[in-house]
C-alpha cells in the first residue's frame, strides 16, 4: 500500500480507502471480515456515508482494537434514524445522528467531520443558518473533530466553502465522465474542475474521491456515456493523478470486491494506463496535459507529467510547487526536443514547446 500525506496535519493516508455505500449487502460477519482484510492490507481510511445503518456496528467491532491507526469520515447531515440513509440540516437531528454513529463505531472522536452533501446554494445556506457548520467548527476547537471536510459535487459551491478557510479535506466525485461533463454529477467545465483540483492542492486541502467509477457506469460499454468501458484500475489511477487527491474510496460489497480492488497495488503500468480517454475527450480538453505519463519514457529522463503538474500548480498560485520543481533532478531545460513525447501524447499536447515554456517560467 502507498500512502499520501495530509497537508493539514501530516497524517499518512492510504491511497485506497473504502466507501460504505454498498457493503450493507453483506452479512455483519462478512463486513467485519472485509474490514479486517482491508486493515491487514494497509487500508486506513474509511468513509461512513453508508446507505444503511447496518454497517456501523460491524465497523466498530472490527476496528475497536486498532482505532488509533485508522481514520473515519463522519458526515454531519447523514441521518440513520429510520435505519436507512437520510439527509438533514436540522442541528438537533444532526447531533443525535453523529452521537449514534460514534457509539456504534465505539469511538469518542472524529478524524474528519464532514459538512455533508452540499450540492446546491440552498444546501449551503441551510447548513450555515441551522448552525451545522458552526457546530463542527466548535467540535474541532474542543478536539472532538480533528479535521473539517466537505462532500459536494459542485465546484462553485466547493469554492465558496474553501473561501471560509476551514477545510482540511474535500470529498469530490472525480472520473473521466464527470470531468468531461457526462452524467448527473458532471457539473462544471473541464477548466472549472481542473481549477478546483489545483486550488485544493494550493490551499493544502486534500481530496478523497467518491464515485471514481461513476456508479459502475464507466466499467460497462453499454452504460458508459462514451460507449467504451474503462477498468477499475484505470479509473483509480485517473483520480490519483489529479492534483490534491490523497485517496480513492471505491464502494465494495464484500471480500471479493476488496481483493479485486487491492490488486491495483500490484497492477502493471499498462493495466493502469487510461490514455484511451483521449479518444472521447471533448474538444476543450485537447492540448491539455492530464499528467497521464503516456508520453514516457523520456530519453532525457524528464518526468513530463510531474513537470507539467508543478507548472500548472505554480501558475495557480501554489508557492510550494516552485520548491517541488526546483528539487527535481531533471528539469525542463534538459529537453532535447526529440519529439518522442509529442508522438505518444493522446491529447496532442506539444510537450516540446511546453518544456520550453516551463523552463522560462521557472528561471
Image (tube, rainbow, N blue to C red):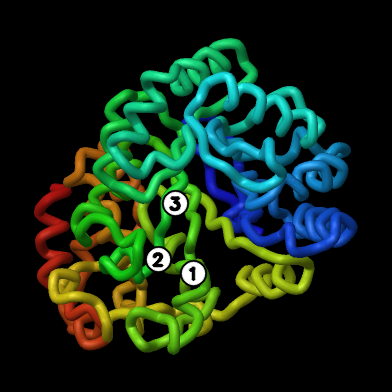
Q: Which residue is mark 1?
A: 213
The quadrant the N terminus occupies is bottom right
> What residue lies at 72% left-to-right and 54% top-to-bottom?
42
In the foreground, 289 or 229: 229
Q: Quadrant of the rendered structure where residue 252 is?
A: bottom right
Q: Is 362 located above or below residue 240 in the figure?
A: above
288 horizontally vs 16: left or right: left
**Spot occupied by residue 287 in the image (x, y as percentages of width and height):** 15, 73
Q: Which element type, helix, strand or loop, lies under badge 3?
A: strand
Q: Badge 3, how many Cα within 10 Å: few under 14, some, many 20+?
A: many
Give how far across and how far down residue 114 sits, in percent. 52, 34
In the displayed structure, 207 sits above or below 178; it is above
Neighbours of disc 1 within 10 Å: few (<14), some (14-19), many (20+): many
**Depth-wise, is mark 1 or mark 3 nearer the camera?**
1
Q: Which residue is mark 3?
A: 245
| Disc 1 to disc 3, C-alpha distance | 16 Å
Amino acid at each position: 500500500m502507498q500512502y499520501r500525506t495530509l497537508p493539514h496535519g501530516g497524517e499518512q493516508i492510504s491511497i485506497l480507502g473504502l466507501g460504505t455505500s454498498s457493503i450493507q449487502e453483506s452479512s455483519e460477519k462478512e463486513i467485519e471480515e472485509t474490514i479486517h482484510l482491508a486493515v491487514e492490507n494497509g487500508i486506513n481510511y474509511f468513509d461512513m456515508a453508508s446507505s444503511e445503518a447496518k454497517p456501523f456496528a460491524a465497523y466498530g467491532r472490527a476496528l475497536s482494537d486498532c482505532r488509533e491507526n485508522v481514520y473515519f469520515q463522519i458526515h454531519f447531515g447523514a441521518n440513520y434514524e429510520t435505519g436507512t440513509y437520510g439527509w438533514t440540516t436540522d442541528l438537533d437531528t444532526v447531533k443525535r445522528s453523529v452521537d449514534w454513529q460514534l457509539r456504534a463505531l465505539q469511538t469518542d472522536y472524529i478524524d474528519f467531520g464532514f459538512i455533508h452533501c452540499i450540492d446546491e446554494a440552498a444546501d449551503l445556506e441551510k447548513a450555515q443558518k441551522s448552525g451545522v457548520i458552526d457546530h463542527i467548527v466548535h467540535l474541532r476547537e474542543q478536539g472532538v473533530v480533528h479535521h473539517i471536510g466537505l462532500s459536494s459535487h459542485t465546484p462553485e459551491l466547493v469554492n465558496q466553502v474553501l473561501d471560509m478557510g476551514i477545510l482540511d479535506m474535500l470529498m469530490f466525485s472525480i472520473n473521466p465522465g464527470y470531468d468531461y461533463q457526462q452524467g448527473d454529477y458532471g457539473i462544471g467545465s473541464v477548466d472549472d474542475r481542473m481549477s478546483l483540483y489545483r486550488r485544493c492542492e494550493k490551499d493544502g486541502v486534500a481530496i478523497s474521491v467518491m464515485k471514481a467509477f461513476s456508479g459502475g457506469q464507466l466499467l460497462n460499454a453499454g452504460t458508459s456515456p462514451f460507449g467504451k468501458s474503462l477498468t477499475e484500475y484505470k479509473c483509480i489511477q485517473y483520480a490519483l493523478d489529479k492534483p490534491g487527491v490523497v485517496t480513492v474510496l471505491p464502494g465494495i460489497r464484500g471480500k471479493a470486491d476488496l481483493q479485486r480492488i487491492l490488486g491495483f497495488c500490484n497492477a502493471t503500468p499498462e493495466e493502469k494506463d487510461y490514455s484511451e480517454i483521449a479518444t472521447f475527450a471533448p474538444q476543450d480538453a485537447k492540448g491539455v496535459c492530464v499528467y497521464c505519463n503516456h508520453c514516457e519514457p523520456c530519453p532525457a529522463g524528464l518526468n513530463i507529467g510531474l513537470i507539467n503538474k508543478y507548472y500548472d500548480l505554480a501558475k495557480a498560485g501554489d508557492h510550494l510547487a516552485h520548491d517541488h520543481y526546483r528539487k527535481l533532478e531533471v528539469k525542463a531545460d534538459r529537453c532535447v526536443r526529440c519529439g518522442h513525447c509529442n508522438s505518444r501524447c493522446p491529447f496532442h499536447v506539444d510537450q516540446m514547446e511546453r518544456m520550453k515554456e516551463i523552463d522560462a517560467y521557472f528561471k
